[in-house]
Amino acid sequence: VKPFVIGRKNWLFNHNHRGAEASAMLYSIIETARANGLTPFDYIEHCLEQLSPPNCDLNSLLPWHVNLSKA
């Protein structure tokens, strides 16, 4: 609950609708990564790396399909 309360105070500073939508998307990505046992920073880094080649399979980037174990 604490991160949500802190976020709620920060969301007061979204000056337009597009900024609020961007914040909501990022918050959703981070919380979904956490819910699937992933470190949000590592997950976002992985997604950005995998999105660079053409014809990327977006379904393989869903948090429940990603395995970020450091082998």
Image (cartoon, rainbow, N blue to C red):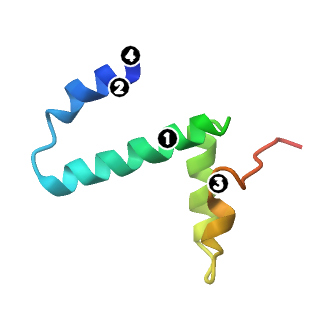
User: Mark 2 — residue?
Assistant: 4
Asked if the residues shown at circle 4 and circle 2 are in contact, with their CB atoms under 8 angstroms apart, the answer is: yes
Alpha carbons under labels 2 and 3: distance apart: 25 Å
Mark 3 is on which residue type?
A: His
Mark 2 is on which residue type?
A: Phe
Q: Residue at x 37, y 51 (%)?
A: 25
Quarter occupied by residue 62: bottom right
User: Mark 4 — residue?
Assistant: 2
Judged from this view, the residue extending furthest toward the bottom is 55
Q: Residue at x 21, y 24 (%)?
A: 9
Residue 30: give its label.
Answer: 1
Quarter occupied by residue 51: bottom right
Which element type, helix, strand or loop, lies under badge 3? Answer: helix
Alpha carbons under labels 1 and 2: distance apart: 12 Å
Q: How many other residues sit within 10 Å of disc 1, few (<14), some (14-19) or many (≥20)? A: some
Vertical order, 29 against 7 (above or below): below
